[in-house]
Amino acid sequence: MSSGDNHHSTFVNPTVHQTFYLVENRPSQLHCISLGGFPPPQLQMLVDGRRDLTSEMSSSDRTELTGSVGMRLILHRKELFTYNFVPTVEDEGRTLSCVSSVTGLRPFVASVKLDVDC
């Protein structure tokens, strides 16, 4: 999953265990995206369930109303992203997780394993 020198990943299916290939000390892209859901969930990006990257990331939140009167559909998209995640050798083999949570419900977690080339 690369585009030139930049790497990116979008977590789509939590049942698919993927490996995310990175290069040590090279800035990389990370995206955590939630589509739909009401109320809109809170998103977190965690490394090994402990190191919280959320405050280091930007966020966007967009809601669209489509369809005709009486048959409207609310489309909600929430995203955490960064273009400057700099992996280190210590990140090798760790798990990067996108956690989507709504109060009162079990969190939805999608994860990838980090493979950092040194």
Image (cartoon, rainbow, N blue to C red):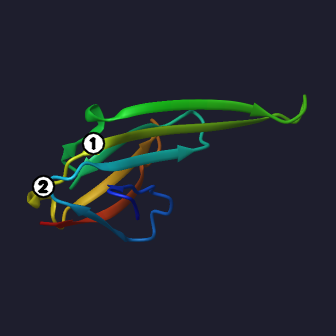
Q: Position of residue 24 (x, y in %)?
A: 15, 58
Q: Quadrant of residue 65?
A: top right
- The CA span between labels 2 and 1 is 13 Å
Furthest residue in direction right, as rendered: 69
Comparing 19 with 105, the one in front is 19
Residue nearest the viewer, comparing 73 with 87 = 87
Q: Residue at x 25, y 41 (%)?
A: 53
Say above or below: 114 vs 82.
below
User: Which residue corresponds to the image point at 40% horizontal and 65% vertical from the top-left?
Assistant: 1
Q: Is residue 69 above or below residue 8?
A: above
Q: Which amino acid lies under the numbered mark 1 shown in the image of this protein?
A: Asn
Q: Residue furthest front?
A: 4
Q: Position of residue 111 (x, y in %)?
A: 35, 60
Question: Residue, x 45% and y 57% (percent of image)?
Answer: 11
- Specify the quadrant of the image occupied by residue 22: bottom left
Residues marked 2 and 1 touching at CB (< 8 Å): no
Q: Residues within 10 Å of mark 1 (few under 14, many from 20)?
A: some
Where residue 34 appears, as percent x and y from the top left, is 52, 45
**Apparent side of residue 23 relative to residue 71 in the rendered image (left or right):** left
Instruction: Kindly identify which residue carries mark 1.
Output: 84
Left or right: residue 36 compared with residue 59? right
Classify mark 2: residues with Cα within 10 Å, few (<14), some (14-19) or many (20+).
some
User: Percent x, y for residue 67?
Assistant: 85, 36
Q: Which mark is residue 47?
A: none
Residue nearest the observer in this picture, 104 or 70: 70
Where does label 2 land, which residue? 88
Circle 2: residue type: Thr
Question: For the residue labelled by badge 1, is the local secondary structure a helix, a strand or a loop?
Answer: strand
Looking at the rendered structure, the secondary structure element under dot 2 is: loop
The C terminus, quarter of image: bottom left
